[in-house]
Structure formats: structure tokens, C-alpha cells
Amino acid sequence: MRSTFAYSAVDSHTEGMPTRVITGGVGVLPGATMNERRTRFLAERDGLRKLLMREPRGHSAMSGAILQPPTRPDADYGVLFIEVSGCLPMCGHGTIGVATVLVETGMVEVTEPETIVRLDTPAGLIETRVLVENGEAKAVTIRNVASFAVELDAEVTVPGFGVVRYDMAYGGNFYAMVDLESLDIAFARSNAPAMIEAGLRIMEAINDQRPVRHPTRPDINACHHVHLTAPGSNAHHSRHAMAIHPGWIDRSPCGTGTSARMAALHARGQLGLHQEFVNESLIGSRFTGRLIEARGVNGINMVTPQVTGRAWITGTATYLLDPSDPFPEGFDL
Ligand code: PYC
């Protein structure tokens, strides 16, 4: 072996969506907060994200998380989310995957029936409650960041689709929510390419015509996720396909998307506090959510979402980079 770099990983999936948890080899990233680390990582070491996420070590819908020492005393670990699309401020399925890996590998002190793991993420502190039986993480509930609806029944003109009506909400990332029926696309796995195409056109139109910006985090200022809601969905059980930039579908029900959807349903008066909301992905996997508090902040009605899901460890690996490898940052097709 002629490798100059070696990264240790525990691979997992959360309700079908991979989280490659990088446990060693990266070193401590510079930055006083996880958000500062995210900004500097994107500017200075983005090649590492590409190496770990893109082909041939990953694929076009790959996702992961780099573990770090926390930057705040109330957290157990720092987490940098890495995706084929960049570094999200927050990722729900990734958080569930990380908490499961930390518990099942013994990287945190485990108590039964519940282990609390606090994660320092670029979007803020996320508390996870892991249901543990005989050392196994059976389910993880995350308390997500403050979420809110930005606009209900907004309209945007989308090439090929005309005027498209959508709700915009934030749940750790910005989400446009569009009824799939209005696009004349059937909710079927075989339509994934059509859903991705529609989602990309909608996000481009929104970012051009009606750009979004987080009120206190100006760095969170784009819509790269479109929640395509299936017919028959309601405020307590919903099915959707989540189209994500630059062109993939979340295999999980999307934790931050589930949070945004609950915030929009709450703003519509359709989902009260402590009511259960089941969100199903395109492959039929489920997260269960509920809103646990609501409060006004600077004139915005913020809600705190909880999301519960399951993750499974799928392997352990050491990813290497040989200096003669012609693709040191992987590649896209
Ligand atoms: O679970 O929050 C999530 C997520 C974001 C992108 C893919 N999954």
C-alpha cells in the first residue's frame, strides 16, 4: 500500500440513507465554533469531502459526518455534516446515524434504557435521546433547531411547469414544499429522475425569483431541497420524495425536511403541539415527529421539532488515498 492518507469510518444507514461517520484521520479542524469549522473546511479542505463522498468511494447520493472534539463544554462531540452537495448546517438522518454509531461502538458512555448524546453542529447544539436495549440503539429522537414557516402558498414561475405553488419553511435547511399532483408526476420510484428534474428547476426558480435568508444566520441563504408531497398526504401522515441539489433523492424521510414540514403544517393551523406526524420517504421508510414547543422570536413563530428514526451500522472501513490515484477528489458522472 502506498497511501498517504487513511481515514477510519463506521458506515451506517438511517431509514435507508447512508451516513459515513468518519471517526479518525482528519485531525482537529480549525475554528472556534462548528460553523466556523464548516466555513473553513469548505474553503480549505473541500477536496476531502469530495474524496469521501463521491465515486469511487461514495456515490451520487452519499452522505456522511466527520467527528470532531466539541467546541462547547455542553456537547459530547462536534459534527461536520458532509454530503455530495456540500456541508449542510444540519442533517437529521445524519444526526440519527452519528448517535447510533457513538452508542453502538461505545464512543460515549452508554446507559439503558436511554443514552443522551449532545452534538455540537454548525446549526447549534442538538440533543439526541437514544433508546438502548442490550447495547443496541433501537431508535434515536433528536431535538432539532428552532424551525419556522417563511411563506405559505407562495408562487414561482418554473420553466416547463408554469406557476408552481409552494410553502417555504426552515427546519435546519430551507425547504420548498410542493404538491406532486400539481406537477403532474405520479409518486413512484420509477419517476425519481422526473422528480429530481422538477425539484432542481423549482429550487433554481426560487433562488432566482424569491431568495430566502435565515433571520439570524445570513450564511444560510439558499433553497436546495424540495419536498414533493404525495397525493393523499395529510397533517398526520405524509409521503413525499425529497429532491436535493445537485440531483438526488433522500432515501430517508429527511429529518430537517420533516421539521420544516411540521413547521408549515403548524403555521396552517393543522398540526398542534405534541401531535404525532409520520413522514414517509420515497422508499417507504418512516420518521415520526412532533412539535414540542412554540414561541415568538422577533415576530417569527418558531417551533421546536422532535424527530425519531432508526439507524443501523453497515460496516467499518479505512478509506485510503494512494498518491498516484488519478482521482484524489473522486469524480461525478
Ligand atoms: O435528514 O435532514 C436530513 C437530510 C438532509 C439531507 C439529507 N437528509
Image (tube, rainbow, N blue to C red):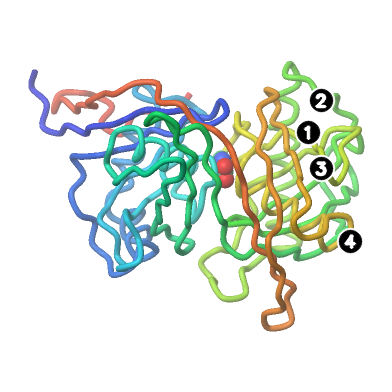
Q: Of circles 3 and 1, which is in front? A: 1
To which residue does mark 3 refer?
Answer: 159
Return the x and y of residue 27 as percentages of the image width and height.
Answer: 18, 49
Q: Of circles 1 and 4, which is in front? A: 4
Return the x and y of residue 170 as percentages of the image width and height.
Answer: 66, 59
Q: Are marks 3 and 1 in contact (CB under 8 Å)?
A: no
**Quadrant for ligand 1?**
top right
To which residue does mark 2 refer?
Answer: 187
Up-down relation of residue 209 to residue 248 (above or below): below
The CA span between labels 1 and 2 is 9 Å
Up-down relation of residue 181 to residue 187 (above or below): below
Q: Of circles 2 and 4, which is in front? A: 4
Residue 142 as seen in the image, left or right of residue 211: left
Three-letter code, disc 2? Phe
Three-letter code, disc 3? Pro
Q: Are marks 3 and 4 in contact (CB under 8 Å)?
A: no
Please tell me the numbered disc located at residue 239: 1
For image coordinates 19% across by 28% down, the residue present is 321
The CA span between labels 3 and 1 is 25 Å
The CA span between labels 3 and 2 is 21 Å
To which residue does mark 4 refer?
Answer: 269
- Which sits in the foreground, 166 or 293? 293
The CA span between labels 3 and 4 is 32 Å
Q: Of circles 3 and 2, which is in front? A: 2
Q: Secondary structure at mark 3?
A: loop
